[in-house]
């Protein structure tokens, strides 16, 4: 290339750069459009629960912009200005302080030249009723560290017609030990609490202990109460529920497993039985304090016992909404501390799938802020579980991305619903996977949960209740280091 051509190229480049700079300067401070987004979705409003919280919003503008809060005493921004960028989104963090009063509203105004974009901000308040003696559901979740499920114990439900190896004449002990766990003792519960777990879920299956009229056997109710008392004596929170009365049922079974279904055709009948069951449970425990929570049911499925959530609009979701309203109404009607107790609802199959969380509705309640949702996640499924040829053996970036997507959609939905949530079951429960990989999972799940201000309850394992030895200390230590002590 000769000198003349070289000079032509250089001059062309310089002129082009100058023109581009002038163009950018012309746009500075005079945007032709302003778009605000959160998690990739365009937004016109932000909704926060009562707790101190924050979120990141993106500003897409082709001019330099400024941002202003309507009330810096509770609604603050990390950046009050940004620059023109047609290729990239610029960001500011929106933060709110804890709201002890009534629901409050404010605005964020983003301006560039003569153009403005106003984002409405609502923060729910601590609108508990006068004289409310219990902590609200948001405070309950905030007070949790990490939890443990006392699985394969009071929820064991072998088919009495085929489980010939079990001596059912031993009464409650036969049922409690049917799935390989020892009779629960105070020492076992003490070990779990001493390790740092501060909430213990005690799943309970009821139907084998109910007569034809729906009356719960007194000995079984007494045993449930004994285990609840063990948990509460440690200072831990305790959750009891209705377990395998709902959920899956093998086609060969002739007993009442899975009698409680997300099914409008059977709702009229099952509702009567369901309400009578909760009336008895709630009456037994109505004088217990706020450390005891009731969970409506576990992993409820439809009449096909499908683990895949129905499509949006299915009447199966209507059955769940009606049953959870029944649950709240019956418990509240028993009086005592049940008027204020924090109650736990869940989605179809307790899943985090988009349709299931979108179809969840919050029951009407006599008092505000005493409902919380529990969800279950064993995701990525092929890592957390043994799924044969589909097994994922390494917890890698694709596993992290799946968890990112899950936790994001859950948090977005519950911000819309205005109630807190926690993960009532989670865990890398396939012990055949490498321990180092399972620890990576535990660390990443803890990171995501804490980033969203929530926590989870590991599904049993970790500890041998026969020998009272911690068999998976690496996972336990990771959980305890990741979740701050309360």
Image: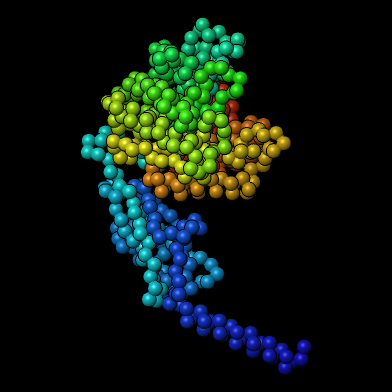
Q: Is residue 429 visible?
A: yes
Q: Count numbered badges in the picture.
A: 0
As drawn, which residue projects farthest toward the front? 265
Q: Residue at x 41, y 41 (%)?
A: 361
**311 or 361: nearer the eye?**
311
Q: Is residue 277 above or below residue 160?
A: below
The quarter holding residue 386 reads top right
Q: Residue at x 56, y 24 (%)?
A: 249
The quarter holding residue 30 reads bottom left
Q: Residue at x 27, y 40 (%)?
A: 128
Residue 230, horizontal then vertical, whole percent: 41, 21
The quarter holding residue 11 reads bottom right
**253 or 11: nearer the eye?**
253
**Left or right, 62 with reference to 385:** left
**Left or right, 58 with reference to 418:** right
Residue 224, horizontal then vertical, whole percent: 42, 18
Q: Is residue 352 above or below residue 192?
A: below
**Left or right, 105 with reference to 141:** left
Residue 404, horizontal then vertical, whole percent: 55, 48
How are the residues colored? rainbow
């Amino acid at each position: 290339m000769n000198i003349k051509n070289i000079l032509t190229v250089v001059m062309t480049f310089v002129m082009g750069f100058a023109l581009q700079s002038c163009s950018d300067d012309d746009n500075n401070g005079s945007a032709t459009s302003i778009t605000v987004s959160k998690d990739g979705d365009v937004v016109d409003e932000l909704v926060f629960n009562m707790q101190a919280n924050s979120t990141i919003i993106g500003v897409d503008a082709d001019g330099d912009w400024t941002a202003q809060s309507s009330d810096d005493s509770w609604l603050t921004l990390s950046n009050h200005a940004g620059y023109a960028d047609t290729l990239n989104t610029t960001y500011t963090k929106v933060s709110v302080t804890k709201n002890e009063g009534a629901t409050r509203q404010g605005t964020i105004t983003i301006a560039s030249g003569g153009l403005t974009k106003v984002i409405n901000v609502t923060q729910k308040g601590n609108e508990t009723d006068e004289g409310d003696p219990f902590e609200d559901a948001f405070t309950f979740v905030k007070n949790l560290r990490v939890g443990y499920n006392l699985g394969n114990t009071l929820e064991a439900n072998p088919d009495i017609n085929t489980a010939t190896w079990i001596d059912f004449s031993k009464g409650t002990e036969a049922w409690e030990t049917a799935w390989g766990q020892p009779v629960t003792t105070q020492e076992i519960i003490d070990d779990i609490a001493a390790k740092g777990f501060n909430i213990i879920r005690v799943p309970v299956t009821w139907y084998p202990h109910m007569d034809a009229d729906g009356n719960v056997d007194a000995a079984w109710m007494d045993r449930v109460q004994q285990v609840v008392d063990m948990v509460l004596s440690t200072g831990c929170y305790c959750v009891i529920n209705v377990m395998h009365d709902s959920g899956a049922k093998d086609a060969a079974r002739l007993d009442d497993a899975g009698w409680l279904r997300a099914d409008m055709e059977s709702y009229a009948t099952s509702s009567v039985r369901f309400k009578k069951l909760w009336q008895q449970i709630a009456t037994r425990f109505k004088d217990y304090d706020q450390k005891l929570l009731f969970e409506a049911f576990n992993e409820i499925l439809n009449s096909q016992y499908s683990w895949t959530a129905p499509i949006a609009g299915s009447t199966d979701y209507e059955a769940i909404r009606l049953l959870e309203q029944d649950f709240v109404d019956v418990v509240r009607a028993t009086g005592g501390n049940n008027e204020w107790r924090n109650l736990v609802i869940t989605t179809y199959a307790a899943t985090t799938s988009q349709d299931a969380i979108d179809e969840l509705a919050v029951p009407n309640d006599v008092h505000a802020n005493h409902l919380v949702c529990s969800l279950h996640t064993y995701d990525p499924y092929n890592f957390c579980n043994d799924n044969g040829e589909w097994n994922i053996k390494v917890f890698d970036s694709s596993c992290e991305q799946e968890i990112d997507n899950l936790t994001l959609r859950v948090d977005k939905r519950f911000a819309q619903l205005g109630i807190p949530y926690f993960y009532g079951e989670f865990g890398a429960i396939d012990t055949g996977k490498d321990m180092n990989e399972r620890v990576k999972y535990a660390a990443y799940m803890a990171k995501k949960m804490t980033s969203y201000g929530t926590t989870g309850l590991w599904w049993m394992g970790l500890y041998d209740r026969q020998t009272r030895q911690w068999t998976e200390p690496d996972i336990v230590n990771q959980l305890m280091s990741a979740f701050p002590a309360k």
